[in-house]
Amino acid sequence: MKDPRYEKFAQVLVHYCLEIQKNDLFMISTTPIAEPLVVEVYREAMRVGAHPFVRLGLPGLGEVFYKNAKKHQLEFVSPLNEFEIEKIDKRLAIRASANTKALTGVDPSRQALASRAHRGIMERYMERSATGELLWCGTQFPCQASAQDAEMSLDEYEDFVLRACLLHRKDPVAAWRGVHRRQARICRLLDKVKTLRIVAKDTDVRMKVAGRKWINSDGKHNMPSGEVFTGPVEDSVEGKIAFSFPACTGGREVHDVRLTFKKGKVVKASASKGEDFLLKQLDVDEGARFVGEVAVGTNYAIERFTKNTLFDEKIGGTIHMAVGASYPDSGGLNKSSIHWDMVNDMRDGGKIYADGKIIYKDGKFVTD
């Protein structure tokens, strides 16, 4: 039996997020867990005359790969992956994990080696995205593993995901267009700014953003979305930041991350849990210790941390910074094989100064 909520979800993904057109070569990347949503997205893409195809990953294969691969296998880049990145027009990545902690026991240096090998693919992906040749979107299917991470029942988590995507609204597309308009005003303000200073508990970090473009993340690349972001001038970040929430990536959780910057580069890094992984990721390549993104989360339908960056970086009243690769469309120049978002809560006393003037306080723009 078809679930009408996933029919609605598919319509938003196909028609609003990715604007699927006739003859688009459309990749859907996920796991078998997301079958109810995959079927509806595939059906809707067929209706508009696109050419959808599905790439399914099986639970456990990542762990098998990292624990058994020889060096030449870790460094191998499939020509099929390179071909796909060059040829596809649209890509939808649906997160649906059977075990979000499956890679916790993997040697982080092995993950770092594979990341370095795939840097070229990541850069090409971002280049095609920046020019509009390739449109992509990432979303989440409500599944048991993610519900457990969020400390919710599956029913509660399903409701959380669908509400965050504004699917409880009568016309979610119209709702996301409203998000676009509100955030466009913020971007116009920030595009005029030359310097930013972010102040919060154990945090005082400054950076230059002159000449960089602020991007309105309005549900096109992420669903849910709700953020504005840019790439700061690479050698300009100075100061320190203590991230409020665990930094989650690659099946790992790193707690109490603290970074100190000098001339744009992380010169000191610590964590109460997962510090070895943090340091290995920061040393994965030359660009990994520089900031590729600074952003403000604006989705106030997301109020709590769930150990899922797709949602956590959008929490209304937070900021996040990503070490590693910049998005070229923001004007950022930093290149790296990683892009790791880390989130800081600004709702209790946090402030953002633009060219010395407060524009954001306690989790909200004071000029909006």
Image (cartoon, rainbow, N blue to C red):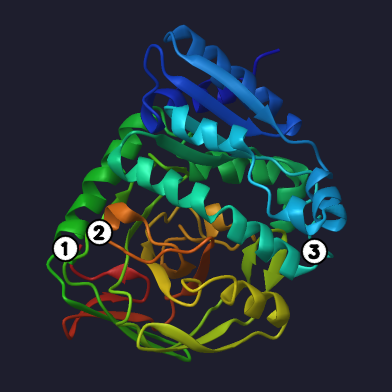
Residue plotted at (38% across, 61% down):
326
Question: Residue extending furthest front?
Answer: 72
User: Which image quarter: residue 114?
Assistant: bottom right
Q: As displayed, is residue 15 above or below residue 160?
A: above
Secondary element at image label 2 = loop
Q: Is residue 245 visible?
A: no
Q: CA distance from mark 3 to mark 2?
A: 35 Å
Residue plotted at (73% across, 54% down):
74
Q: Amino acid at mark 1?
A: Asp
* Mark 2 burial class by Cα count in 10 Å: few <14, some 14-19, many 20+: many
* Mark 1 burial class by Cα count in 10 Å: few <14, some 14-19, many 20+: some
Q: Amino acid at mark 3?
A: Thr
Residues under numbered marks 3 and 2 in contact, where contact means CB atoms less than 8 Å apart: no
Secondary element at image label 1 = loop
In the foreground, 143 or 277 = 277
Q: Amino acid at mark 2?
A: Trp
The image shows residue 291 at horizontal and vertical percentages of 41, 73
Q: As displayed, is residue 194 above or below residue 231?
A: below
In the foreground, 113 or 348 = 113
Q: In screen coordinates, is 148 left or right of 25?
A: right
- Disc ID at residue 214: 2
Q: CA distance from mark 1 to mark 3?
A: 40 Å
Residues under numbered marks 2 and 1 in contact, where contact means CB atoms less than 8 Å apart: yes
Q: In screen coordinates, is 140 left or right of 252?
A: left
**Which callout, 1 or 3, points to the residue nearer the camera?**
3
Q: In screen coordinates, is 13 left or right of 358?
A: right
* Mark 3 burial class by Cα count in 10 Å: few <14, some 14-19, many 20+: some
Residue with the mark numbered 1:
191
- Disc ID at residue 45: none
The image shows residue 202 at horizontal and vertical percentages of 48, 91
Residue with the mark numbered 3:
104
